[in-house]
Image (cartoon, rainbow, N blue to C red):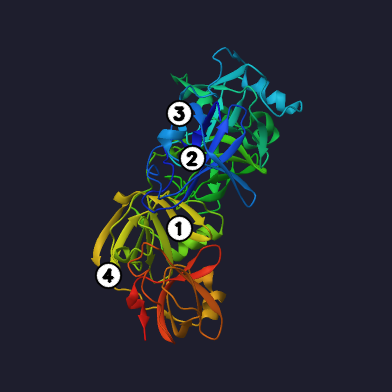
Amino acid sequence: LQDVEFASFELGLTYADAFGRSTLNRTLQDCDGNEIVVRTSGFADFAIDTLPDGNGTLTAIFNVFGDTKQLFIRAADLDVDMAGTRCNAGTGEEELMTIRELRDVFADGGTEGPEDRKIRGVVISDNQNGNFDGRVAVVQDGTAGITIFFQGDHGFSLGEEIEVVVSGQELSLYNDLLQLDFINNDLATSNGMGDPVEPRVTTIGEVLDNAEAWESTLVQINGASISGSATFTGATTVNDGSGSITMFTRPSATFASSALPAEPVDMTAIVSQFTDHQLVIRNLEDVGGETGTGGDPEQISLAELRTLFESGASAVPANRFINAVVISDVDANNTDFRNMVIQDETGGIVVRFADPHSFALGEEVEVSVGGDELSEFNGLLQINDVDNADATSMGNGTLPEPRDATIQEILDNAEAWESTLVKVSDVSYTEGGTFSGAKTLDDGTATIATFTRSQATFSGSAVPNGAFTLTAMVSEFNSPQLTLRNLNDIQQ
């Protein structure tokens, strides 16, 4: 393949997970935006190599798995030559257009930016305080504002002037908010700090009357009361006597857990939309406060984290920590080297670190998780990409007692019991052989799979004959399963 490159949102990553020995997909694209998967085994000797950040050629074997068309390279130094200039950096000859002119293109039925055009504006969103997705920048010039959704996290700061090539780039609505969608990060360049954007002094009534025209611009509301919750997290209501409007704060914002102001304030905010019109603040300075983390860290239970995710949260609220006991066994290697399964008195969860960890079975740990991602991996809830430095050992803890249960009860309560210990009596494997891979357990009430990694110290051991008592962690890989920690989990 000629003139291809790895997508901007993949840059800085490796071909695969060499530590966890996990096969990963990376996105390869051409200059017209066509994409295909490049799939690499975690056992490849180049799995740990960083993806090239240039444009060039790639030689590969083509394969189809289900509906997925994919490529396999044989060796990075043999098949990949990408040292050229990336294809989506623009020509450098684009003419400037205003953001209002760009918005008018969409209002007139256009779905992409005009050829050979760029916009210039000042970033009015704040990428330092967590109230905007890392891929989102809100930009305003002297005519209007627009939201830009990049392919990967950007590094543009509040107040920075940037130019963005919009030629052929998609204009679309996301929950009725107009945005330049999935923009290649290479299309945006910084001009340094720009002139400060003065907010439009107005009322909520006027904001509601002009919301479409003022979308993605700064406004100032004087004498605004904020109510509906004790803290900023989630949806609250702003009222200034002329009307009321929703204000939304992401749980990952650094000020999410800060108390709402008790008295009316003069507030600055960005006019936004999520089906209905709403306001979004950047930091506490927008409401007359000081930017900060909201006081001393606050403990949150694992059950509360799970409830937050079920309610739609994609990140842990700011300024939170968890305290729990490790129930996985890093020494037996039956969990990924970056994964730690922990349980407190309310529930359990997987913590996935940025790098391999060494926390032992039975160790009590305290982990700062404020702002970290909550997500599912094949149905298993985890706190993702946690900085290893954010976890501290508190010494030996007290392992939770496993819950006595039948397999049918585990299946009936799999989501609630996920990442906690259970004990199943009079259970047996339906087939012989070794523990390695997927095996089926039966206790007469139902069947469930256990899965043992090939790296586990006991993977080559023979499964027991006859009935036994099993202690295991409730897990999931698209469907519920049980995971052994070590051979001590088997009692005959």
The nearer-to-camera label among 4 and 3 is 3
The kind of secondary structure element at disc 4 is loop
Residue 327, percent across and down?
35, 69
Which numbered disc, 1 or 4, marks the residue that appears first in the sequence?
Answer: 1
Mark 2 nearby-residue class (10 Å; few <14, some 14–19, many ≥20): some
Residue 14: image tag: none
* Camera-side residue of 101 and 110: 110
In the picture, which quadrant includes the N terminus? Answer: top right
Tell me the kind of residue under disc 4.
Answer: Gly
The nearer-to-camera label among 1 and 2 is 2
Q: Are discs 4 and 3 less than 8 Å apart at CB?
A: no
Q: CA distance from mark 1 to mark 4?
A: 22 Å
Mark 3 nearby-residue class (10 Å; few <14, some 14–19, many ≥20): some
Circle 1 sits on which residue?
382
Tell me the kind of residue under disc 2.
Answer: Ile
Residue at 51% x, 37% y: name it: 135
Q: Are discs 1 and 4 less than 8 Å apart at CB?
A: no
* 54 over 365 or under it: above or below: above
Circle 4 sits on which residue?
397
In the picture, which quadrant includes the C terminus? Answer: bottom left
Q: CA distance from mark 4 to mark 2?
A: 46 Å
Circle 3 sits on which residue?
81
Circle 2 sits on which residue?
73
Instruction: Please identify the residue farthest to the right as the structure is shown.
Output: 109
